[in-house]
Amino acid sequence: MQVCKYCNELLPLSRFGKNNARANGVDYKCRPCNRLLRRDYFKTKGGVITDIYSNEVKSSRERNISPPHYTKKELKLWLLSNPLFHTLYEEWVASNYTSSFKPSLDRRDDMLGYSFDNIILCTWGENFARCSLNILNGTNIKTVNTDFSICIDYTGLEVTCSSIREVVELTGLTYDEIWENLDNTYMGFIIHEN
């Protein structure tokens, strides 16, 4: 049993997270308090910056592009010196933390990594809308970075398309149908991402 330093409740050790730096091996705050503290932290400007930087590092790894060309500290200084960041943050708070209003960064050129000359400050909703529009236009490098080959199953005829939009126009399938059935026979087509 241990007393949580935040809620002051006496709780079993199983209600605490691990902390190898402490003598008893458990954290000084219980899991529910830890969750609340993390939630509250990610609503602060520092938490938003941490979230943005962590997502950039993660997406760089997933997309096999170079990691951000700046440190988290440099990004923090850059964002905090930008009046637009403060405006977007205040609008997000005023919206009661609606995710589409959350400050975000988008890359100008999806072929390049995250660098100060290749990022623009926007809301998450604007970032998502821009991504969606690029998908519709077949120009979203983040999602569509290769050609597609379409094999018409019953004839063996194969066609190469340079964008998912071309695949949609040629087959009449929806974007969801294409992504969900990639490399499978669907409606007489086999679609491969090259």
Image (spheres, helix red, strand yellow):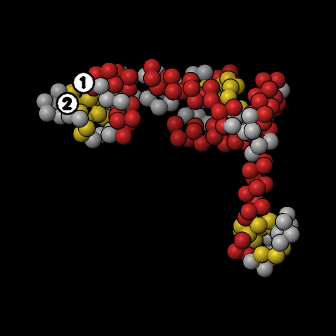
Q: Quadrant of residue 17?
A: bottom right
Asked if the residues shown at circle 2 and circle 1 are in contact, with their CB atoms under 8 angstroms apart, the answer is yes
> In which quadrant of the rendered view does residue 163 lie?
top left
- 10 Å crowding of disc 2: few (<14), some (14-19), many (20+): some
Which of 47 and 172 lies nearest the eye of the viewer?
172
* Visible residue check, residue 12: yes
Figure check: 27 above or below 102: below
Mark 2 to mark 1: distance in Å? 8 Å
Residue visible at 22% across and 31% down?
151
Q: Which mark is residue 81?
A: none
Q: Residue at x 82, y 76 (%)?
A: 10
Per the image, the residue denoted by label 2 is 152
Residue at x 85%, y 63% (from the top left corner)? 6
**Label 1 CA crowd tier, 10 Å (few <14, some 14–19, many 20+):** few
Outermost residue on the bottom side: it is 1
Callout 2 amino acid: Ile
Q: Which residue is mark 1?
A: 159
- The answer to whether residue 115 is visible is no
Q: Position of residue 133 (x, y in %)?
A: 51, 22
Location of residue 1 with respect to 72 vertically, above or below:
below
